[in-house]
Amino acid sequence: MGVALPMPAMETEMKTQRTTRGSRAFTLTELLVVIFVVAVLAAVLILPMFARAKHGSGPNCVNNLKQIGLSFQIWEGDNGGKYPMQVPVTIGGAMELAVTGDVAGIFRTMSNELATPKVLVCRQDTKRIAATNFAAGLNNSRISYFVGLDAEDKYPQMILSGDDNLTVNGVRVRPGILNLSTNASVGWTKERHDGGGNIALSDGSVQTTTALTFQSSLANTGAATNRLAIP
């Protein structure tokens, strides 16, 4: 048989037990709150990443433009230090095609360097489907990137290529040749990259730009006018 405790001691023990049970209940509540907060943070931070991953497969837009820029540099190295836009068609270039806005013709000239036409479509460009080959399947409607016709390797800050969802004075540009002055009011439509855009420069770098930073890049090309072939 247990030893009966004096009344004051019994009351003290009962209070201790209630305090202990209360502490355990409060700790459990805290744990549930922490779990809830972690779940909310996970939903906010992780789910958008999965959403972006599902948006498209393959290399992202920056990688596409890096590969395009590298292809231009390799082609240039094999053709007297000139890009396809400065070399006549009769000797393997795309000069005559470029001035008509035939962007596909420029990239077709570099088919060996590009390896696949899939890099010519931005994964966020939902209006276009990549061509399966560089022959009959490739035309301007299968390309997401413009080409800077005046770009040269000796002018590293000139714009070589970039997303074609450009705007001038708030209006989406049309396919063809676009003459951009350094003070032109340029920007991007909201259909890709959350209203931003990517440009590749002659030095091989790729910049992710807003309208403001693109305007700054345009002013630093070293040319009063920049001709872009829009697909």
Image (tube, rainbow, N blue to C red):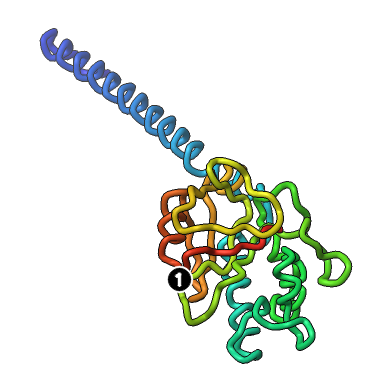
Q: Residue at x 62, y 57 (%)?
A: 178
104 with respect to 55 (left or right) = right
* Residue 191 drawn at (x, y percent): 62, 43
Q: In which quadrant of the rendered view does residue 151 lie? A: bottom right
User: Could you say whether the residue bearing mark 1 is in a helix, strand or loop?
Assistant: loop
Which residue is pictured at 50% across the width and 66% down the height?
A: 206
Residue closest to the eye, 125 or 153? 153
Query: Who's the residue at 47% across and 65% down the image?
Result: 224
Q: Is residue 174 above or below residue 104?
A: above
Q: The N terminus is located in which quarter?
A: top left
Placement of 121 over or under 211, stated as above or below: below
Q: Nearer the viewer, residue 37 or 24?
A: 37
Q: Is residue 199 left or right of residue 129?
A: left
Figure quadrant of the C terminus: bottom right
For mark 1, what is the residue? 157
Image coords of residue 148 (percent x, y): 59, 67
Residue 57: percent from the left, percent from the top?
68, 56
Q: Position of residue 76 (x, y in %)?
A: 61, 85
Task: Identify the residue at horizontal 59%, vertical 77% (top origin).
Answer: 70
Residue with the most extreme right position: 136
Looking at the picture, tell me which residue is in the foreground, 140 or 53. Answer: 140
Viewer-nearest residue: 37 or 48: 48
Callout 1 amino acid? Gln
Quarter where residue 48 is shown: top right
Mark 1, Cα crowd under 10 Å, few <14 / some 14-19 / many 20+, is many
- The quadrant in which residue 107 appears is bottom right
Q: How many circles with numbers are drawn on the protein? A: 1
Give the residue furthest to the top.
Answer: 7
